[in-house]
Structure formats: structure tokens, C-alpha cells
Image (spheres, rainbow, N blue to C red):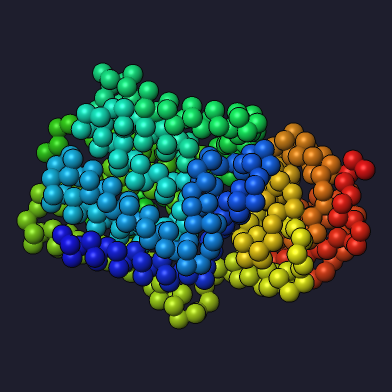
Amino acid sequence: MRALWLGIFALLLASRLCHWDVLWIEEAYPTAAAAELLNGKVLYKDIWFDKPPLFAGIYVLWGAYTGLALRLAGAAFGMLSAWAAARAARAFWGPREAGWAAAFTAFVLTFDTPSATLALTPDVLTVPLHFAAAALAFSGFPLWAGLCAGVSLLFNAKGLLILAACLLWQLRRAHMLALGFAIPVLAAAGWMAFQGSLGDYWQQVWLWGAAYSRDTLLSQPLLEGVRRTVNWSWFHLALIAGLLAASWDEKDMRWPAWLLLSLAGVFLGLRFFPRYFFHLLPVVVLMAARGFARLTPKRAAVLALLLVIPLARYGPRYVQLVQGRAWSDLAMFDSSRKAADFLKSRSHSGDTLFVWGYRPDLYPLSGLPAGTRFLDSQPLSGVIADRHLSNSHVTFPDIARANRQALLNGPRPTWIADGLGPYNPSLDVRSSLPEMMAGYTLAAESPGYRIYRIAPGRQARTGAE
């Protein structure tokens, strides 16, 4: 078992260090928000943030640093997830299942879509809590299971589905589950009410999130969800085979019910991004571990060869990064690096930045603090980032109109970087915010960006003046 854990640690650490110089957009957003928190700002009140509070809060733990600190945090989180999987499998069955569960978790957290596995997103951050909540519910600790589900809600709204999964084992003690769930949720709500950000939290996370889920860009979302789920199952065929082996003699219907609840988490939002499938990971890993543990060692080893499918698909990406070869997935990140180099060479102490488009990586890359409460253009244009590079459909017209007025009434940032207009001219910052841009001049233009600087003496002016 010691050799297994050393292997898991080596795999997680080496894979994360391959991405030392990369900042995925999914992790740039909470990094930028965490940096603002460390500057004394209040989440939701001073920083528009459409995700639950602990998503930004956890990035504060390593000082919102990128590079080595971020990758070490990712490796540590992977170890925590593998440990939670092992503990859950041991609670349900025994030590053989624990070893398989830990190995499968570490493997999937390494050989899957890089932007999904490397970035600590809400869907990934709830994985160890999901394992823990289910195991605690099964073991007869409903209060602690509810507590884990409540904390997960502060990372991801799908924490409600984790609570529902716990009910499968603790329906008769649902009141204890509810009590445990309420403790962290009410504590967080009380803290936000004390800071005066509770109303903003409700609008930005829940109202915005509900409208976001309804307005999918897919013409046939359910059909697309089935197609992508089949593709995910194909790439994780070893786990699916183990799950089927465990299901052959399994009579407890709570397992398929948990599987359906987890699948519902994938379909919520009707977008089916790769990171959404991590809500399936705990139940699939545990059942796969059970199936492999019941096989003879020889048969289990043969079935494990199916892991070559994701290994062959995603493994070469790590080699490609280490060799410094071009990668299309990082094209926009490379353009942000070049824009950040320009800003660092021209900015001065006290300068601030506003990024138009969904390019939050420019904040940590440039080292400039946010000059407004908005870290991207979505709450100002009303156009969701999953389509705004090529589409101008407005999902939130009223919210966007109010936010644009608030922006005009606030202080002007020193720099405005338009990372959207070069891709979608109809959403160019000059036409989207004409009153604000009147005081700015073009300072630089590079692939993917137009960078504007405010005219001297204009920083202190506001729209109210």
C-alpha cells in the first residue's frame, strides 16, 4: 500500500509540475478574485463573482499565487481526493477496494481533459467532499455527512445533489442531515449578511446561475448530453467495465439511484463541459473499485489495460508541454502572456486594470489589481462567455444595463485590455462602453488584445462627476 501511495503522489506531482507555466482560464478567475480579497475587498459586494464563495476563498490559502504554489496546491488536492476515495471504499467494503479507488481517482484526475483536471474548479473541488459525505451517511454519521454536503454547496450548487445522495442512506435521520447541512450554509450566509454582501451573492450566484442554466447555446441539449456522456464512458471504459462487474450481483438499489443523481449533476446547466463529469466520479470510482476487487488479480490486470485509452489520449499532452511544443488549447493563454508583458513594461505603481472579455488570466499575469468590481465583460454586456467570441446574444439585459451604469459612476482604471473585440467586433469595448472609452487611447495591439490607456489626469474622474 505504501508503494501505491508513493506512486500516486509521484503521478500527481509530476503531472502538475508539467503545467508550471500554464494558467488555465478556469483557475484564473478565482485567482483574480482571491487577489482582490487579499487586497481587502469583499466578495460579491466589491467583486462581481458568479460562483459560490469558497471557490475564490480556497485560492486565498496559497496567496492567489500562480506557478509553483498553484501546482503544489493541485497535487495536494489530488492526494486529498485519492485519500477520500480510499476511505470511502474502505467504509463501504474493505482495503482491496480502497486501493483501487485511490488509484482510479488519481488516474482520472491526471488523464482527462487538461483544463478540467488541472484547474481546481467547483466541480473538482467537491469530489473529496462527495466521497466523504456518502461514506459518512453509509457509516451512520448523518450530521457529519450533512456538514460535508453543506460545505460542498459553498463550492458548487450541486452540493444539493450530494445531500440528496446522502438521503439514500439516511432518510430516517434526515433531520440530522439537514442540521449538518445547515451549519456551514447558515454560517456563510450570516458572514455575508454581516459584510453586506448577501443580496449581491443571491443575485450573482443564484439568479445569474439560474438564467445561465436556462439559456444554453445547444440546439438539442439532451441529445448532446447523451452523446457526450457516451464519449466520456468510452474514454473511461475501464471504470465502466468495473462498474458493470460490480452491478452484476448488486441488489442494493441505492447505488443506481446515486448514479442517476450524479448523472443529473452532469446535465444541470445543459452544457456538458468536461469538468461537469467530475460529479460522476465518486459513484463510478467506488463501484469500479468494487468490481475490480471482486475479480481475480489476473482478470483485474487485464481489464485495467483499458486505462490505456485515456492514457493514450491525454498523456502526450504532458510530453508536448515539457518539450515546449505549440498547443492550440493554449493559444489564447499565450496571447494573454504577451499582453501581460506589455503591461508590466509600461505600468507604474498604483495602476489598475480592467479586462473586457472573459480573460481573467491577464490580472495575475500582469500583476495589476482590478480597477473596477468587474473582472470580465459578462455582467456588463449580458453575453455569456461560452458564446461571446462569436455570438452577441444577450442573456441578462437588465442586469447588464444596471452594471454598466454602476461602472460609469465608479473610478476609471488606468488600463483597459479588450480581449473580446478582436474576436467578435460587435462586442468591441469601444462600441459597448462608448462613454467610458472616451477618455482612453490605444496604447498597443497584439493578437487577441487591444490595450488602452487612460489620458493623463482622468483616473480620478467618474461618471457622476
Q: Is residue 306 above or below residue 375?
A: below
Q: Residue at x 65, y 47 (%)?
A: 40
Res. 437 in view: no
Left or right relative to 36: residue 139:
left
Q: Is residue 24 above or below residue 291?
A: below
Q: Residue 49 location, x and y as percent?
A: 62, 43
Q: Which image quarter is the N terminus in?
A: bottom left
Q: Which image quarter is the C terminus in?
A: top right
Left or right relative to 119: residue 279:
left
Q: Residue 206 location, x and y as percent?
A: 57, 32
**Closer to the camera in the image, 362 or 179:** 179
Q: Quadrant of residue 315?
A: bottom left
Q: Quadrant of residue 279?
A: top left
**Closer to the camera in the image, 27 or 227:** 27
Q: Residue at x 75, y 58 (%)?
A: 352
Left or right relative to 305: residue 368:
right
Q: Residue 136 location, x and y as percent?
A: 26, 34
Left or right relative to 20: residue 1:
left
Q: Residue 29 location, x and y as percent?
A: 58, 53
**Count of numbered tags:** 0
Q: Residue at x 81, y 63 (%)?
A: 452
Q: Residue at x 36, y 70 (%)?
A: 14
Res. 137 in view: yes
